[in-house]
Image (cartoon, rainbow, N blue to C red):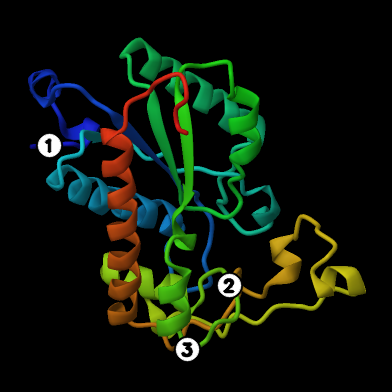
Amino acid sequence: MKFKLTEMTLKEVRDFGKVEVCVLPWGSCEPHNLHLPYGTDTLTVEKIAEISCKKANEKGGKVILLPTIPVGVNSNHFGFPLVLNFSPTTQLTILKDIIYSLEKSQIYKLVILNGHGGNEFKTFCRELFGKTRVYIFLIDWWNVRRDIVERVCEDKTGEHGHEEETSWALYLFPELVHLDWADEGKVNEPKLKGIKEGWVWIVRPWTLFTINSGYGNPKKANSEKGKVMIEGATDKIADFLVELSNVEIDEKFPY
């Protein structure tokens, strides 16, 4: 049975029956070193969502996959060409409209599957709490199985276009990866000690922080590492979707 809303007809939606959970993947459009496509976050989270929803429905869940949002918060990447950016207020407006749409269909469980570190949804969830019947569950998918990441990745430095992210891409969309084009993902050190030690936070201007937008060396990436990380994460996400699908909303939900 189909579960991707963009590919379903009205008949198929009606035949699906009661929808318990909707999954909203949210990515970005930004450069990832010289070797990965601008849509890496979007392509990755969309495939993670599809794999997870497929596994969940095969286990008895009633889960629909919503269209992926392909633009995220990327203002700190301006300076590189063709970076696309939503302001946080734009993201909140989009999220409100999606939630309103789900309420009209009497669907009250929404999972935001986030694929981009610059997308900060926790504040939005707090803003919307108590103002909608829809319960929002947030998953930053790359954090789901950090134990696997620590086990399979050899170079654990960096966070953008690095070994981990490149391995995902080599597993999910290898035809778009050009590993031989990549640089080593070196970055510039901040002058201020607090920032360097990590207890002072700033918005990092990516064109000053990085050389070619990458942070971390991708050279040891391969598809087998990607497969282990992706399959482990999607198994765990799918189990949560099934559990969420099966639990009844009552006056004490989700406790």
Question: Which numbered disc flags the more N-terminal residue, 2 or 3?
Answer: 3
- Where is residue 170 drawn, in percent x and y? 32, 73
Say what secondary structure mark 2 lies in: loop
Q: Residue at x 46, y 38 (%)?
A: 137
Q: Residue at x 45, y 22 (%)?
A: 134
In the displayed orientation, state which residue is furthest to the right. 192
- Whether residue 66 is visible here, answered yes or no, is no
Read off the residue under disc 3. Answer: 154
User: Residue 247 lies in what quarter of the image?
Assistant: top left
Residue 161 visible in the snapshot: yes
At label 1, the amino acid type is: Lys
* Disc 2 residue type (three-letter): Gly
Q: CA distance from mark 2 to mark 3?
A: 17 Å
Among the two numbered marks 1 and 2 on one chain, the one whose residue lies closer to the N terminus: 1
Q: Would you say 142 lies left or right of 11 here? A: right
Image quadrant occupied by the N terminus: top left
**Crowding near the residue tagged with mark 2, few <14, some 14–19, many ≥20 C-alpha atoms within 10 Å:** many
Q: Is residue 137 above or below residue 100?
A: below
Q: Secondary structure at mark 3?
A: loop
Instruction: Choose mark 2 or mark 3, whichever is in front.
Output: 3
Judging by the rendered image, the residue that carries numbered circle 1 is 2
Can you give x and y, in whole percent of width and height, for residue 187 in the image? 70, 78
In the visual, does 13 lie left or right of 126?
left
Along the horizontal axis of the image, is 10 left or right of 20?
Answer: left
Q: What's the mark number on residue 214?
A: 2
From the viewer's side, name the closer residue of 96 and 206.
96
